[in-house]
């Protein structure tokens, strides 16, 4: 599914964030130490290769809501943006910290003149954020913040399951 908001196209698809070769950047749902692990971070570190770990080390630790970026190494993108989402019910206020992740990731994209960015559903795996709540925050934030980033024309949510895709689609169709 896709919708256009001014110059910005917002796409939703089911897929793997490590295989988005047509995007300038993808976002990692990182941990504070920017190390590999399960979920998105594990898949990204495996695909990027060991140089990513070296590049991340001097940037860590990061705080919930913060975003930093590195080269994408073995990934088929120019750049990799690492965000630390809030652990649901622990890092408070979770909604504001989750919105900050998306906002700061987009700012990072703007600073590096990246025209297209792919996001996973940050915090909805190991960090326990309910998908429907997280999707509402994520979609609202990227539409309002993405349209003010110079040169950004495409934001794609790459959802791992069809269920997560369906939830995001339900919210996006209803968005003003
Ligand atoms: P967090 O720790 O921020 O919750 P996770 O990596 O545990 O991050 O999960 C975030 C979301 O990303 C979950 O919905 C998970 O199913 C999904 N996910 C896991 N692997 C991938 C992948 N390769 N591409 C896209 N999404 C993925």
Image (tube, rainbow, N blue to C red):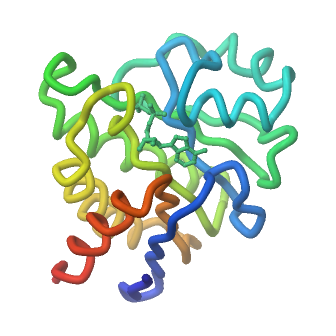
Horizontal relation, residue 36 to residue 14: left or right: right
Query: Most extreme residue toward the front, as rendered?
Result: 162
Q: Percent x, y for residue 28? A: 56, 38
Q: Quadrant of residue 147?
A: bottom left
Q: Residue at x 77, y 63 (%)?
A: 21
Q: Residue drawn 21% across and 71% down?
A: 171
Q: Position of residue 112 (x, y in %)?
A: 66, 52
28, 100: nearer the viewer:
28
Q: Relative to residue 45, is residue 127 drawn left or right?
A: left
The quarter of the image holding the N terminus is bottom left
| 95, above or below 148, in the image | above
Asked whether 74 or 102 is in front, the reply is 74
Quarter of the rendering occupied by the C terminus: bottom left
State the residue in front, 175 or 161. 161
Between 70 and 148, the one nearer to me in the picture: 70
Quadrant in the rendering for residue 50: top right
Check the image and report above or below for 59 versus 28: above
Q: Position of residue 55 (x, y in %)?
A: 77, 21
Q: Is residue 46 above or below residue 4?
A: above
Looking at the image, residue 54 sits to the left or right of residue 82; the answer is right
Question: What residue lies at 48% left-to-right and 46% top-to-bottom?
Answer: 105
Q: Quadrant of residue 125?
A: top left
Q: How many marks?
A: 0
Name the residue: 56% across, 45% down.
Answer: 27
Percent x, y of residue 109: 58, 53
């Amino acid at each position: 599914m896709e919708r256009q908001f001014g110059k910005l196209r917002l796409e939703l698809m089911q897929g793997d964030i490590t295989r988005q070769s047509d995007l300038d950047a993808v976002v990692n749902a990182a941990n504070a130490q920017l190390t590999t692990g399960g979920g998105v971070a594990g898949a990204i570190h495996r695909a990027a290769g060991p140089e990513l770990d070296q590049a991340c080390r001097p940037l860590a630790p990061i705080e919930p809501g913060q975003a930093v970026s590195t080269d994408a190494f073995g990934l088929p993108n120019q750049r990799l943006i690492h965000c630390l989402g809030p652990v649901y019910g622990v890092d408070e206020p979770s909604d504001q910290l989750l919105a900050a992740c998306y906002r700061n990731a987009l700012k990072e994209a703007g600073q590096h003149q990246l025209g297209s960015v792919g996001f996973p559903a940050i915090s909805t795996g190991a960090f326990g954020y309910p998908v429907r709540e997280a999707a509402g925050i994520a979609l609202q934030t990227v539409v309002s913040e993405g349209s003010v980033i110079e040169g950004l024309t495409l934001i794609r949510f790459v959802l791992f399951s069809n269920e997560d895709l369906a939830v995001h689609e339900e919210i996006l169709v209803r968005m003003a």
